[in-house]
Image: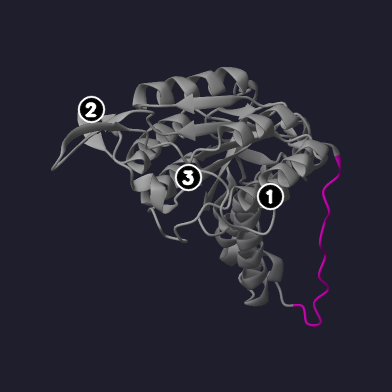
């Protein structure tokens, strides 16, 4: 809708008319060098109509220019639709393990057996979609850790990169400590009480320059909460030439370290043995770290004063041109 920031300036609009009606008219006298009989009558007869027409045109243009200048001074603005602004959103980093062990096919999605990574992608993407008002980032780690998506309000972009994360993209090992260290680097400058790192892994720390506990102690110093998720089924039936046997595909999972990381930083450790448990874990994290939305609204605003101002300048140029050519 149209809005005038300084609407009260409209009160000066009648000023030229008041001056025209109250001040005495200025009489222009020209002294001719050579007088001829009936000169004034001849001049009046030949130019009366043209003079009146030119005078009316000048008056109309001048008043139109004045109206446009008053309109520009009122600062017209176009206001868009109201949009919600989060009062205080959280800064939340997701850390996803893409080491070789995430290829283990011990999860199900919609009744179909899938790899751990497939289930993690689906559930994490749905989790991100619910974080409206938060800045979310993505860290992938294998032999080392890298930021795939920096902290952003663009949740669709984060979901896109989650869906494109591939097992083995940065090696087969698991650098949990490096992932925590990178999260600390990205979160430490953010406002306190809103720094959260969610670490999902199915193994133990087997690579990297820093141990997970050392990195967690640094995170503790900066007030970063770390929620850890241990992924993998505990029992899987394997059939081979000698029959069926039960194996534990998660024997490499270091639950003790993940629990200690969570305890040190004020977070919580979760165990996801199947897709259903993973969904409930992210639901629980949503409750522990609720999005803080609402309270403020804003309208996008565009200034429009330059339109009447430009038209007024154009009309002034027309008047100046007419005077230069002797038409007035």
Q: Nearer the viewer, residue 102 or 81?
A: 102
106 versus 175 height, above or below: above
In the image, which residues are magenta? 23-35
314 versus 231 height, above or below: below
Q: Inspect the magenta stretch and tell me whether residue 26 lies in it.
A: yes
* Picture residue at 35% right of the left edge, 27% below the top: 275
Q: Which residue is mark 3?
A: 158
Earlier-in-chain disc, 2 versus 1: 2
- Mark 3 to mark 2 CA distance (whole Å): 23 Å
Q: Would residue 34 be seen by someone viewing this image from the given angle?
A: yes
Left or right, residue 102 beside residue 6: left
Residue reaching furthest to the front = 242
Q: Which residue is mark 2?
A: 110
Q: Report the mark closest to the observer, 3 or 2.
A: 2
Circle 1 residues within 10 Å: few <14, some 14–19, many ≥20: some
Q: Report the mark closest to the observer, 3 or 1.
A: 1
Residue 57 appears at what percent x and percent y? 59, 55
State the image quarter where residue 15 is shown: top right
Residue 237 marker: none
Residue 225 appears at what percent x and percent y? 69, 32
Residue reaching furthest to the right = 23
204 versus 3 height, above or below: below
Residue 211 marker: 1
Left or right, residue 302 beside residue 120: right
Q: Main secondary structure of the magenta part?
A: loop
Earlier-in-chain disc, 3 versus 1: 3
Q: Secondary structure at mark 2?
A: loop
State the image quarter where residue 327 is shown: bottom right
Residue 58 appears at what percent x and percent y? 64, 56
């Amino acid at each position: 809708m149209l809005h005038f920031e300084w609407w009260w300036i409209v009160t000066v609009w009648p000023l030229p008319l008041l001056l025209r009606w109250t001040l005495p008219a200025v009489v222009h006298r020209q002294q001719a060098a050579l007088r001829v009989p009936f000169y004034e009558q001849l001049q009046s007869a030949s130019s009366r109509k043209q003079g009146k027409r030119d005078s009316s045109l000048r008056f109309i243009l001048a008043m139109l220019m004045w109206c446009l200048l008053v309109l520009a001074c009122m600062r017209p603005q176009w206001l868009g639709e109201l949009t919600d602004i989060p009062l205080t959103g959280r800064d939340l980093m997701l850390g996803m393990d893409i080491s070789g062990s995430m290829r283990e096919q011990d999860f199900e999605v919609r009744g179909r057996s899938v790899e751990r990574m497939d289930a993690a992608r689906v559930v994490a993407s749905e989790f991100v979609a619910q974080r409206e008002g938060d800045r979310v980032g993505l860290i992938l780690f294998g032999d080392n850790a890298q930021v795939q998506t920096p902290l952003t309000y663009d949740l669709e972009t984060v979901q896109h990169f989650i869906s494109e994360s591939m097992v083995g993209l940065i090696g087969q090992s698991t650098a949990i400590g490096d992932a925590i260290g990178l999260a600390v680097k990205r979160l430490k400058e953010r406002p306190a009480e809103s720094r959260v790192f969610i670490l999902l892994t199915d193994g133990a720390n087997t690579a990297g320059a820093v141990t997970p506990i050392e990195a967690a102690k640094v995170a503790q110093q900066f007030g970063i909460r770390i929620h850890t998720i241990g992924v993998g089924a505990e029992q899987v039936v394997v059939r081979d030439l000698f029959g069926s046997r039960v194996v534990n595909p998660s024997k490499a999972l270091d639950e003790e370290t993940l629990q200690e990381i969570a305890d040190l930083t004020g977070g919580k450790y979760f165990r996801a043995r199947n897709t259903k448990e993973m969904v409930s874990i992210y639901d629980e994290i949503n409750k522990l770290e609720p999005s803080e939305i609402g309270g403020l609204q804003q309208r996008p605003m565009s200034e429009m004063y330059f339109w009447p101002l430009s038209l007024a300048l154009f009309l002034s140029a027309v008047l100046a041109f007419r005077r230069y050519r002797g038409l007035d």
